[in-house]
Amino acid sequence: MEEIKVGLEVHVQLVTLKTKLFCSCSSDYRGKPPNTNICPVCTGLPGSMPTLNKKAVEEALKVALMLNAQPYETSYFFRKTYFYPDLPKNFQITQYDKAGGYPLAHDGYLKLSNGKTVRIERIHLEEDPGRIYYEGSRATARYSLIDYNRSGIALIEIVTAPDMSSPEEARDFVERLTTILSDVGINVKDYEGSLRVDVNVSYAGGERVEVKNVTGAASVEKAIIYEMFRQKTMYEKGIKVVRETRAWDEKRRITIASRGKEFEAEYRYMPEPDLPPVTITESLIKKVKEEIGGSQEDRYRELINDGINEELAKKISSDKNLFNVYEKIKFYEPSLKQLAANVLANEISYLIKRYSIKTLPEDVSGLAEILQNYRIIPDHESVVAYLKKWIDGEKVKISFKTVSAENIQNDIMQIISENYEKIRNLEYNKKFEFLMGILIKKFGKENKKVLVEELTKVLNKIK
Ligand SMILES: [Zn+2]
């Protein structure tokens, strides 16, 4: 197979923010009537002045640090000029890395599941444009509709080097990035269209084709598979692939030619005179570092150091929620950590998916109760039911009389000595049955599993 090269430009809305990037309009624009979440700044009325949302810089910095990128001490905003109805000012405020400009951060990397490193060239802040709607399909609509509610929403753009060489790697990149984003509270999965990818694909050293606005990891993979096939077919027929911009049609799962690519020069970048430079101080970096805690890699390493196997460690480290519970249990009762890892990676992961659970309880005492009694809970369904109770914040009390394996042996020994005369001449099976009868009466049949196990051990010992 000929080589393909894939580079991504990922746009992420900073969904944790309350307001837009340069004005005080709400960042919660979804589901609002068109053009009601706007002001003179985000619709670019003459005389309006942008003010930078400080929190946006902090959030962007969090992502940059998680991606191992270096922040620039000073970076600038530029005006990127183009004429399109989604852009009321006719320019987009963004950051630029040429003409004396610097982005927010540069030279990071992200490791893929297969161990490969994808370089991240830069991360910068910019504003989202408005949205264009068509009644019916774009091809048949007689006019376009525009909604500026999204105009001015804070975005970060993450630009990778063309380091990925298969559709699967690009998908993996987006999935790993999504985990990193959720680690810092940016849960893109909960906000439709909050992560949009421009995919650059070139086949066999040919021109690169940019597929714009692909949403979600699975669609990124599909768009690249299609583009690979399209470019390969052209290559084999001897047709030159031209550098162009295409659009991803999610319904038909194909890419289609769209407007001609503007080249950098046509954007007429110029410094934005209404905004001061962005300054990232050492103390801000320190503050942000404290807030973000560790990365997936850090979590994975800790689990492996604790003796948790790779498969479980991978599952738990990919979800900060699961890892937090693991850590709490480890602190609460260190001897439960192995069992906790098992239950978190299996039953609790299952429940999170099944009931779309967003957060797990802070208090792990209910979970500890379940784990401590794990062996005597009669069946798997009951385990899951207890876990669901804990997740729902209900008080968990294992409702039957519980016995622990350690204590039960003494009780068994005592019962044997009390009944020694009656059982000394009985066959093993009869002896077993007789003693089980007494034990069940004393501890309840819900403890049968552990009683059988422990009685067998004791009888084998004294045989
Ligand atoms: Zn506004």
Image (spheres, grey):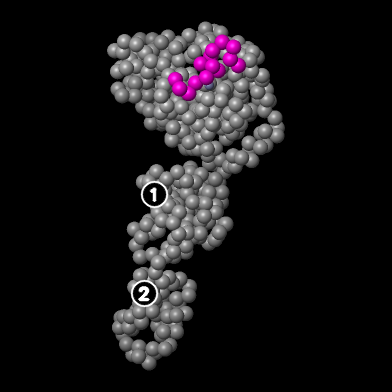
Magenta range is 35-49
Q: Which of the numbered marks, if any, corresponds to residue 313?
A: none
- Could you tell me if residue 231 is visible in this image? no
Instruction: Name which residue lies at 51% across and 56% down.
Output: 364
Instruction: Name which residue lies at 45% across and 77% down.
Output: 409
Front residue of 24/290: it is 24
Front residue of 47/407: it is 47
Q: Is mark 2 within 8 Å of ligand 1?
A: no
- Image coordinates of residue 250 in percent, x first then y, are 34, 24
Residue occupied by mark 1: 351
Front residue of 146/402: it is 146
In the rendered view, tell whether residue 216 sits above or below residue 144.
below
Front residue of 244/376: it is 376
Instruction: Name which residue lies at 45% across and 80% down.
Output: 411
Q: Quadrant of residue 216?
A: top left
Q: Are marks 2 and 1 in contact (CB under 8 Å)?
A: no
Residue occupied by mark 2: 444
Instruction: Name which residue lies at 54% across and 31% down.
Output: 17
